[in-house]
Image (cartoon, rainbow, N blue to C red):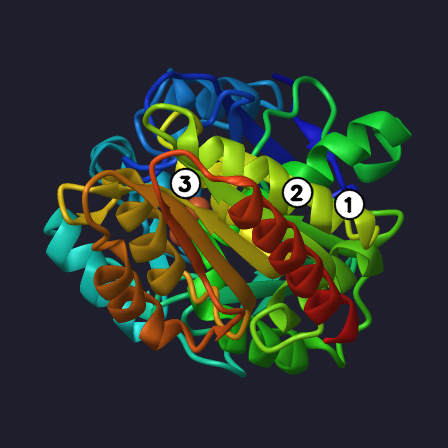
Amino acid sequence: MKIHPITDKIFALHADIKSDDLFEGIWPIPYGVSLNSYLVKSEKIALIDLVRDWVGAPGELAGQLASLGIGLDDVDYLIMNHLEPDHSGWLAEFRAINPHAEIIATQKGIDLVRSFYGIEDGVRAVKTGDRLELGEGVALDFFETPNVHWPETMMTWAADGQVLFSCDAFGSFGALGDRVFDDQFSEEEHIFFESETLRYYANIVSSFSLFVKRAVEKVGSLPIEVIAPSHGIVWRTAPGEIIDRYVRYANYLEGPREKEIAIVWGSMYGNTERGLDAVIEGIEAEGVPYSIHRVPNEDVSWVLADAYKSEGILVAMPTYEYKMFPPMAYVLDIFERKHVWYRKALRIGSFGWVGGAKKEYDNKIAPLKWESIESVEWAGSPDEDTLAMLYDRGRALARAVKEA
Ligand code: FEO
């Protein structure tokens, strides 16, 4: 990877991670993810955000710095906007190479520097309003933005260049290759990154949407020319686009959401699937768009992304040993953790000798505050009357979505 100048003093560095390893040990990254760092070079040298030792990332970082004639031991300040180990995992090794660089983070971040890495010396806690002078009129200002994504998170601002180093906020999945700036990607590539931004937001950030809105308000008065996140594209031409996108995602929490239906289904022997086909006919008759995901065949990462943006949810699953189809129970657990709340919802499904999914399902959706259309359950294969009822329920769910 190359190093990319943002201004004559600020540079974007990144390591593309392409691995079967899961992000946070949970989320697939088949298209990779970038770990972004930034160099601010004046009389003093600051490095903003680090990497973990993952698929050669530390070597990439060192190599890109070396291309400017800078060694890791030339860094005077290491700014840690966020201590999650995707950005901090290589901190102990960095400190061993460069024992004199001062590590700067919020007080909660400094606590994590100690608890994760056992580092107690050469650290400085900063808070909103604090400034770090780098010489020649270049300074970095700090803004605490708790819970975007962890409680210790902050953003860093360079007035020289009007660059906001936003950490996880405004980030996405997806490797970048040799380009990093928004104006270097085609429309088609932006469509891809928009999809990976939504999936990243739903998977990583969605539980903290209220804090995303607060953070946007906090930095909203800054004259931002460049959004420089810790994952994904650096926005220098249209920074407002990624800010607007994140605000839209944050607003999905309480609405408005997209007038779409996310269908999540599982079927053991095709009986629930036959019923689902009738519901889909009803949805299509109302002209409401839908996404469809079969579990467990499809990873919950993509299920969550579509559910997070959609006003309607259709859950189709059989009863399994008197309870819910197990993969669907996991999906609903994730929905609860990631705040997929206040949706219009419908549940359908078949059973063998007796139902039983209802009780567990009702318990699981209670905290989600979903507004449910009357569910439909049937024994064995759906008969004509049941199929007609399922078609009507599909129309009813679609109408509820349209009217929301
Ligand atoms: Fe990219 Fe929350 O770490």
**The disc label shown at residue 280, or none:** 2
Asked which secondary structure carries label 1, the reply is helix
Pick whichever of labels 1 and 3 is earlier in the sequence. Answer: 3
Question: Which label lies toward us, 3 or 2?
Answer: 2
> How much space separates mark 1 and mark 3, taking CA atoms?
48 Å
Asked which secondary structure carries label 3, the reply is loop
- Image quadrant in which the C terminus is located: bottom right
- Image quadrant in which the N terminus is located: top right
**Residue 160 visible to the viewer:** yes
**The disc label shown at residue 50, or none:** 3
Looking at the image, which residue is at 71% across and 58% down? 395
Amino acid type indicated by mark 3? Leu
- Residue 403 or residue 311, whichever sits in front: 403
Residue for badge 1: 284
The crowding category of the residue bearing disc 3, from other C-alpha atoms within 10 Å (few below 14, some 14 to 19, many at least 20), is: many
Classify residue 288 as left or right of residue 371.
right
In the rendering, at what x and y percent does residue 266 appear?
40, 35
Amino acid type indicated by mark 1? Glu
Asked which secondary structure carries label 2, the reply is helix
Looking at the image, which residue is at 62% across and 49% down? 388
Question: Which label lies toward us, 1 or 3?
Answer: 1
Q: Is 132 located above or below residue 291 in the figure?
A: below
In the rendering, at what x and y percent does residue 386 appear?
52, 48
Classify residue 325 as left or right of residue 68.
left
Label pair 3/2, CB-CB below 8 angstroms: no
In the rendering, at what x and y percent does residue 334 appear?
34, 53
> How much space separates mark 3 and mark 2, taking CA atoms?
47 Å
Looking at the image, which residue is at 22% across and 65% down? 359
Q: Is 261 located above or below residue 401 in the figure?
A: above
Q: Is 53 located above or below residue 120 in the figure?
A: above
Amino acid type indicated by mark 2? Ile
Label pair 2/1, CB-CB below 8 angstroms: yes
